[in-house]
Image (cartoon, rainbow, N blue to C red):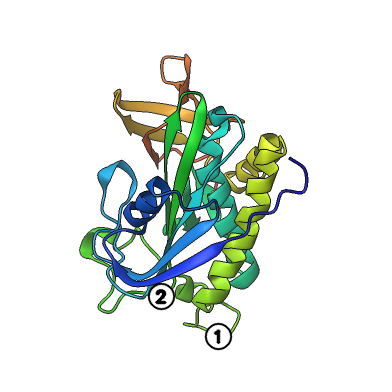
Amino acid sequence: MAQMETRFRVLRLDEVDSTNLYTRGLAEDGAPDGTVVVARKQTSGKGRLGRQWHSSGDFGLWFSILLRPVFDPKFAGMLGIGAGVAVAQAIRSLVGAEAVLKWPNDVLIDGRKVCGILAEGRTVGRQLEWAVVGIGINVTHPEGGFPPELEGIATALSQHCACDGEGSAPDKDVLLDSVLSEFGARYAMLHEGGARRVRDEAAGLMESFLGRRVTIRGEFGVLEARALDLLEDGTLLVRLDGGETMRITAADVSIGTCARGPGENNA
């Protein structure tokens, strides 16, 4: 599908339980590809593995994108990864910070999480009927700071923005437009058979992650391994301590204490 262009239609809400939940409802009601739901605050923001995403105020950019992909559903995992690439590139362009990725789709600055992404979908037969990609970006620090459990883990763009002086942050509408533009380009690549190109971009942003010792937590339990490679379908290839390799499709991954080299940050 050459020269595909997604037209994004943005719906703005003052408050919602979760932009992902709201957008899933729109998907079931037949809303079109490219529908974007933005909320000033979420009362029950969703993170990966059922976690809550701290987004109870307007200190961040909280939004979800409804997609109706027509490419092979085996590449569905690349939607969240493509969104991670889009956010990282938008941050690099607007903020000047060296945003990087940690599999599957966390965006980090200086080893701290500035953005989380949650991709969900519904498959009917061999077709991905719809997907919802939820994105939460900490633009400024919440009043009173992050909760104690997030101190030392989370960060905000205002802490790293060099564009307008220390403590500033990009306008949220400008940030949204930049992320959607970057994501639209990667979404088009996936439809044009360019999953490898998106994978290569993502792998380049994961240079500080790939090759590292990681702890993997999933339905299979807890594993210690070394992250080897990002595959074209978005799965992570790891080598377990016993020497065998394993493909990880869904799990929580944290970087271990065994670094590849000097100057690397753990997250």
Relative to residue 249, is residue 262 drawn left or right? right
Q: Which residue is mark 2?
A: 140
Residue 158's place in the image compared with 178, above or below, is below
Q: Nearer the viewer, mark 1 or mark 2?
A: 2
Dot 1 alpha-carbon crowd within 10 angstroms: few under 14, some 14 to 19, many 20 or more? few
Residue pictured at 41% horizontal, 20% vertical: 241
Q: Quadrant of residue 136?
A: bottom left
- Say whether residue 212 is visible: no
Q: Quadrant of residue 53?
A: bottom left
Q: Position of residue 9 (x, y in %)?
A: 54, 64
Residue pictured at 57% horizontal, 57% vertical: 88
Q: Secondary structure at mark 2?
A: loop
Q: How much space separates mark 1 and mark 2, taking CA atoms?
A: 14 Å
Q: Which residue is mark 1?
A: 165
Three-letter code, disc 1: Gly
Q: Nearer the viewer, residue 207 or 92?
A: 92
Residue pictured at 58% horizontal, 72% vertical: 95
- Say whether residue 145 is visible: yes
Relative to residue 74, is residue 46 drawn left or right? left
Q: Which mark is residue 180?
A: none
Q: Secondary structure at mark 1?
A: loop
Q: Position of residue 238 (x, y in %)?
A: 49, 25
Three-letter code, disc 2: Thr
Residue 127's place in the image compared with 49, above or below, is above
Residue pictured at 25% horizontal, 78% vertical: 144
Total residue callouts: 2
